[in-house]
Image (cartoon, helix red, strand yellow):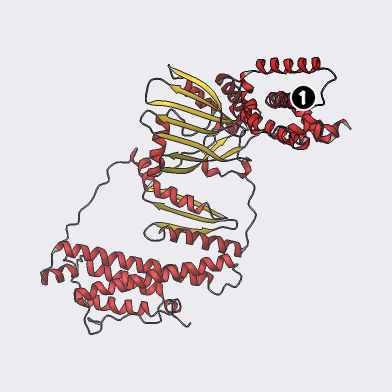
Amino acid sequence: MNKFTNSLLRSEDKHPSDEQMVAFINGELTLRKHAAVAHHLDGCWRCLAKKKQMEETVFALVGRRERRLRPHLPPSTGAEGRLVALLNEQSIREEQPSQNSLIYGLRSLLPSTMNPVLASIFVVTLASITLFFIWKQAAPSLSASDLLGKAMANEQALAERAQPGVVYQKLVMRRGAHSIERTVYSDLQRKRVAKAQHLDAAATAMKQAVEAGGVSWDEPLSAIDYNRWRESQHSATDRVKSAGDGLVSVVTSVRYGPIRQESLTMRTSDLHPVRRTIETRSQDTVEIAELSYTELKWSEANEALWEPLSPMLHEEGEPTLNLPKRSLLTDEQLDVAELEARLVLNKLNADANEQIEIKRSRNAVHVEGIVDTTERQHALNLGLRQVAHVVPSILSLEELNARRNAGSGTASIRESAVAAQPAPLEEFFHENSKSSEEMGRVSNQLLSLSLEIQREGNALTELNRRFHGNDELDPLGRSALTQLLTNHSSLLRAAVRSEIEILQSFSLVPEQSTEDGHTITSAAAGLTEQSTRNVSLCRELISSSESSPRTAQSIASEMAKTLHLLSRDPVLLALEPNSSH
């Protein structure tokens, strides 16, 4: 029975409302709720103080009501008794404390006689209102040092007694009209360190402002970090103030220096920090607020977010990422994962000029590749991690070059002694009095377009080969496939039109067919073969050669016919917006 009672008391062990407190004082609660409130009052000094204030207020109002009604009671038998009663009332009125003057000031607003029921309602209402203002204006009894000491002790105790796990904390940071959201990962036992996240321009500016205020970027809402900054100030004063429902703030003002004031707001229930502010003397304000706080098991963590575990911790056996073994995926799951990964790469324009390769195993889709910058690397990895069953492994040239520079020597370059003939396009521009700068610009445009045509053609061919006619794709997979086919076909048609327009604008395309006896690729060839042929022709047009090359017009004529065959490819025609296929 005692265990059952204790479980009920623990389930109800939360701060009672004003209505519940008034009902408790009046004895109007059920036996179970009365016991629960009494149990809570035994361990909560704040609610106990609240109860005492309510009792004093109610008793004062009830006494005042009795004094108001006393003159209207039936008179006593003698005039002497009435005179004594009046004198007693007058003396009580003169001795009434000044803090009750507000109550007596309401005398003129009340009728001389009042229905007892209405009078009782008025008393209870006035008591609740008075208690509300008293509660809001009452300052916490603990000092700033006491509050921070308990908060720091809680943080340290959590790290010591916590089971291995990860904290996922989402924050919002505001500075003037600018705000960013960021996610902070931390080890519950403070033994593993999360990898540094890439910051864009807005986040970098926010980080500089936060660190200028003495706030740790990795643990901005830490009581230990706040106390470290507070103790480093030589002329600081602290005060404690209520910060709303269930919140209390420690405010530290600094007399000298760029920082005018900082504050740390905590929950009164467990002294968990939820907000920190920085105010400078230049009227700049930074606010850091917690949006969510979640504790996860290591089995739910992403290993890619953490620095490698030190050998010492491995020997001690804590903490290790015991990731669950992946179960084998079905072909349909792998198809959907690959299509969604391709769609992410397409939206990030990563399937354009970057070396990205997609591979499949029995339990995941692996996206590997090399990009130019670390910033681009983080962006791709972040986007791909949002797709289920996809494992990104994107490297950056910046990282690779940094590793290579330490031990690599200067590569020797051998120059060819054979004099190469000018490129056909160069000769054509020279004959038509075109500048070398314009020739270089046109060469770059033609090569870029030909490579784009090849890339988009290969993508369409691969998607059709792998997924065309796959009736087992779920709606999500079919939607991703349709969007990918539409995007790639649109880019391919646009690149073909642009390349033809360049050839026509410089009169490189003759009206006759191929010259020099070269045979045009047949219409039966696919997108891959046609687009590869177009790249080869483009390189022949813009590159120097040791042998005597064909004329620019001859090469351009073959390019134009190849592009025409590309535009009439059945795969591309089937994807035209107004196609009836």
- Local SS, label 1: helix
Is residue 501 in view from this perspective?
Answer: yes
Residue 530 in the image, given as x and y percentages of width and height: 36, 75
Quarter holding residue 48: top right
| Residue nearest the observer in this picture, 206 or 60 | 60
| Residue nearest the observer in this picture, 385 or 121 | 121
Residue 257 in the image, given as x and y percentages of width and height: 37, 22
**In this picture, is 463 found above or below 57?**
below
Q: What residue type is labelled 1?
A: Arg
Q: Residue at x 63, y 52 (%)?
A: 326
Q: Which residue is drawn at 15% across and 71% down?
A: 428
Is residue 268 in view from this perspective?
Answer: no
Where, quadrant-wise, is the N terminus in this rendering?
A: top right
* Residue where numbered disc 1 is placed: 70
| Residue nearest the observer in this picture, 397 or 546 | 397
**In this picture, is 321 found above or below 464?**
above
